[in-house]
Image (cartoon, rainbow, N blue to C red):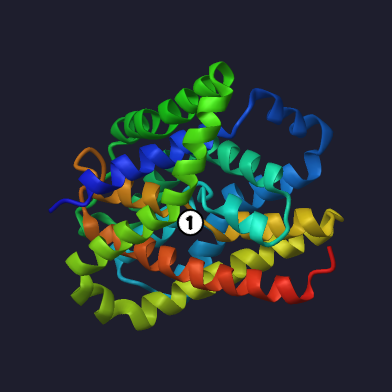
Amino acid sequence: MNTIFIVLPILTVLMFDLGLILHPGDFRLFLHRPRPLLAGLLGQIVLLPVIAWAVAWVFQPEPLFFIGLMLIACSPGGSSSNVFSMLARGDVALSVLLTAASSIITLFTVPLIMAWVTHAAGAQTGVRLPVGNLLVQNLLFMAVPIVAGVCLAARRAQLAARIHQVLKRLAFPLLLFLAAVFFVQHRAAIVQHFPSLGAAVAVLILLAMGAGAALSRALHLAGRERRTIVIEIGMQNAAQAIAVAASPLVFNNETIAIPAIVYALMMNVILLSYVAVLARTAPD
């Protein structure tokens, strides 16, 4: 079974749900609070791919895993980050806006970065990136659902709120289901490479969170904003990375999706641990 028939509907649902809680007025935060938005987007769009490249240089994964590691690093923030920000007593409005902004920006940055990555991986991988197909897939399964959610929320606010209450409870189970299906299909490769790949992914997540904390402190952000930035930079949209890797229109290679699955599993463990520590130590 090709996981693309599971991941694309899940990705669409997650993006639609994001649109339901996003209001055009939310973007006024760019004018009123530019520093936290700058920190989040700089960390997400620029620092995370650079950190992933450095991690790959140290751990030297095989070429397809290198492509997959860079793919998850340049993907947008995961929608579950909004829930994690709430649990961490962070700034949920900032989290929603950063997730939406990164989802829109990465429609265009992912093709640019991944074209460079596939070239760097070398012709021996047999992997090429059809940039046009990737743009079309991202627009159809990310931009269109977000816009549909925003339009529904603007016209039928109460209905949108009821749908969101259902979808936000489904988001995490759907991602776990996707990870479980993918693990069953590729368990031999995941188990074989987990010691090295798992270590690389764990280092990537921890460095990303550390970079978020350092960037937030450098910009003198408040505690709630700082916690949100750390979560946003550490939590990636694994569903999108898997969709790009497995799609017959793009890479059509599920091996490239394995780092995204490992990332999805480890980011939840690491970030849940982070939230648990905050529950005991965070003063505000």
Q: Is residue 247 above or below residue 30?
A: below
Secondary element at image label 1: helix
Q: Which residue is mark 1?
A: 73
Q: At 51% across and 41% down in the image, what residue appears? A: 165
Nearer-the-camera pick, 45 or 9: 9
Residue at (82% x, 61% y) in the render:
217
Q: What residue appears at the point 83 percent right and 53 percent down from the top-left corner? A: 219
The answer to which image quadrant residue 102 occupies is top right
Residue 102 visible, this orientation: yes
Residue found at the very far right of the displayed protein = 220
Most extreme residue toward the left, as rendered? Answer: 1
Residue reaching furthest to the top: 155
User: Split into 4 quadrants, where in the image is the C terminus?
Assistant: bottom right
Q: Is residue 218 above or below residue 203?
A: above
Q: Residue at x 32, y 52 (%)?
A: 242
Q: Is residue 83 left or right of residue 29?
A: left
Count of all numbered marks drawn on residues in the image: 1
**Residue 206, quarter of the rendered image:** bottom right
- Type of residue at label 1? Ala
